Amino acid sequence: MERLPAFDRPIAHRGLHDRQNGIIENSIPAFEAAIEHGYAMECDVHVSGDGKPIVFHDDDLARLTGQQGTISMLSAGQACRIPLLDSASGACPPRFETLLETVGGRQLLVVELKHQVSETATRDLASSVTKALADYRGPVVVESFDPHLLTAMRAAGFAGVLGIILMRNAKRTKGLNGFFSEMILRHMLHYPMTRFSFMSVNRTDLDLPMVRFWRARGLPLTAWTIRSEDEARSAAAHSDQIVFEGFLPVGT
């Protein structure tokens, strides 16, 4: 397994986006802005209907594009031709490979894999991201709320760093049910299967007993989503780094 990269720079949530100025979340301009300011960056990845990884947060297209339907209903070619609402440059959702080319190893990339509604889509997302990262030489980690996706990444042959995303109210982790019950998710009892190497935790949930347990054992922890300098100061004593949006952290 690869060595865990240092979380030595604040992580721009979905890139350094600024909708009022036409820079939309998870767009290439948002990631270019993060690089320009010297930040690490987090992105979200779904899988298209033809099994290709697309950088996009929501299941549904409406909020970010004004279109009806879901990413999973479209081919990658179709999804990547839909303009993002309010983008000053007319940016469209990028392919994951395009993002990797843009970042080019210049800053740490944190890749969040979004929960999929079927086992087939879960396998497709894991295998397509693993394939895209096979020749990438920059610092990168992969994380998800969904333990299935972490195990699917290992099954696909990914040998890099995996992290689990956690919040207190696991019921809000849409679509996760069955064996991975709320108790298993909240207390991270899936560890024997997922073997995560770091945690990303909701800033209000840093006091959870299992978060404190793993932190005491030396597991790195990032806190999300930090939206002010006050929140950053509060999280600093309990985390190794912040995932931020809506402001520029002091000293950067």
Image (cartoon, rainbow, N blue to C red):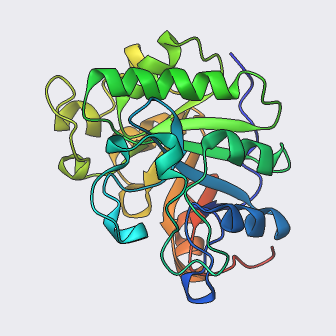
Q: For this view, does 194 lie left or right of residue 119?
A: right
Residue at the image position 53 percent from the left and 37 percent from the top? 53
Is 50 situated above or below 199? above
In which quarter of the view is residue 118 placed?
Answer: top left
Q: In the picture shown, does residue 235 fall above or below 97?
A: below
Asked whether residue 197 appears in the rendered view, the answer is: no
Name the spot of residue 93 as percent of width and height, x first.
Answer: 55, 56
Residue visible at 17% across and 32% down? 181
Q: Is residue 191 left or right of residue 82?
A: left
Instruction: Report the side of 196 relative to 11 (left or right).
Output: left
Q: Nearer the viewer, residue 6 or 51?
A: 51
Q: Can residue 95 be seen in this view?
A: yes
Q: In which quarter of the image is the C terminus?
A: bottom right
Residue 70, given in percent of the width and then of the height, sits at 31, 51
Residue at x-position 37% and y-position 64%: 204
The N terminus, quarter of image: top right
Measured as percent of width and height from the top left, residue 248 is found at 69, 79
Q: Which residue is drawn at 38% across and 54% down?
A: 207
Toward the left, the furthest residue is: 178
**Up-down relation of residue 215 to residue 184 (above or below):** below
Q: Observer-nearest residue: 31 or 2? A: 31
**Against 238, is 113 above or below?**
above
How many numbered marks appear? Answer: 0
Quarter holding residue 20: bottom right
